[in-house]
């Protein structure tokens, strides 16, 4: 039996294209930034975890849960400061709506695990990140299910 294998370039490209299409972000990055991402809204996406999915695996192939971390950044001192969470929440809402609306990422994955059937669901946690300045951030969990990724051999 032929397997799909993991194709991060394709999955990441599909997920990032949704962010770019929203028109909300000054930058959309395919990696976690190691320096301050700048002013305005920035979205970054990277691999967080890869695990097998027993319930979707068979005797000869294994399905996989590829968990991406996405983070939306905005400088915490953006004025007016009362609008920082409004902008951040709107960006997260747009991203989550886009991922729910194309939950197969253009047919490249079995599905985005929206409701957490095989682990943590599509979700966002809010907090802060410090570079040379403080950023208000929302960290998304974007769980992707890939069927028949690996071949099992007896």
Image (cartoon, rainbow, N blue to C red):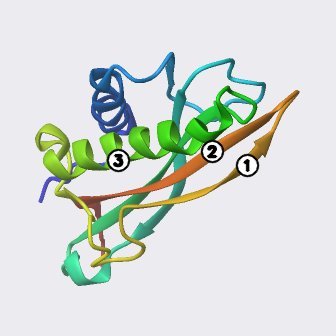
Q: Quadrant of residue 79?
A: top right
Q: Nearer the viewer, residue 24 or 48?
A: 24
For disc 3, the marked residue is 93
User: Label 3's element?
Assistant: helix
Q: Residue 102: horizontal and vertical position, in percent?
A: 15, 45
Q: Is residue 124 left or right of residue 36?
A: left
Q: Position of residue 65 (x, y in %)?
A: 36, 64
**What's the residue at 31%, 40% (across, down)?**
94
Pointers 1 and 2 in contact (CB under 8 A)? yes
> Image point 56% across, 37% down: which residue?
83
Precedes in sequence: disc 1 or disc 3? 3
Horizontal side of 44 relative to 121 (left or right) equals right
Relative to 110, say whether 60 is above or below. Answer: below
| Residue 98 spot, x, y in % from top left | 23, 42
> In the visual, does 137 lie left or right of 20?
right
Q: Is any part of residue 92 visible from this angle? A: yes
Q: Secondary structure at mark 2?
A: strand
Q: Which residue lies at the image location 54% right of the left edge and 26% below the top edge? A: 41
Percent position (x, y) of residue 43? 51, 31
Task: Please identify the quadrant where the C terminus is shown.
Answer: bottom left
Label for residue 74?
none
Report the side of 56 relative to 9 (left or right). Answer: left
Reading the image, the residue beneath label 2 is 137
* Residue 42 versus residue 57 in the image, above or below: above
Q: Quadrant of the N terminus?
A: bottom left
Mark 2 or 3, nearer chain start: 3
**Residue located at (78% from left, 25% from top):** 35
Of 115 and 56, the residue lying toward us: 115
- Count of residue discs: 3
Q: Which mark is residue 128?
A: 1
Which badge, 1 or 2, is on the more N-terminal residue? 1
């Amino acid at each position: 039996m032929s397997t799909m294998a993991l194709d991060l370039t394709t999955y990441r490209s599909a997920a990032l294209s949704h962010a770019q299409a929203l028109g909300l972000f000054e930058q959309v990055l395919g990696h976690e930034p190691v320096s301050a991402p700048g002013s305005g809204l920035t979205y970054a996406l990277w691999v967080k975890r890869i695990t097998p999915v027993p319930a979707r695996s068979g005797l000869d192939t294994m399905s996989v849960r590829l968990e991406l971390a996405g983070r939306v950044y905005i400088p915490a001192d953006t004025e007016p400061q009362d609008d920082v969470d409004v902008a951040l929440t709107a960006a997260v809402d747009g991203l989550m709506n886009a991922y729910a609306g194309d939950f197969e990422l253009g047919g490249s994955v079995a599905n985005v695990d929206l409701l957490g059937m095989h682990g943590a669901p599509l979700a966002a946690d809010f907090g802060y990140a410090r570079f040379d300045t403080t950023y208000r951030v929302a960290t998304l969990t974007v769980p992707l299910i890939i069927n028949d990724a690996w071949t099992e051999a007896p």
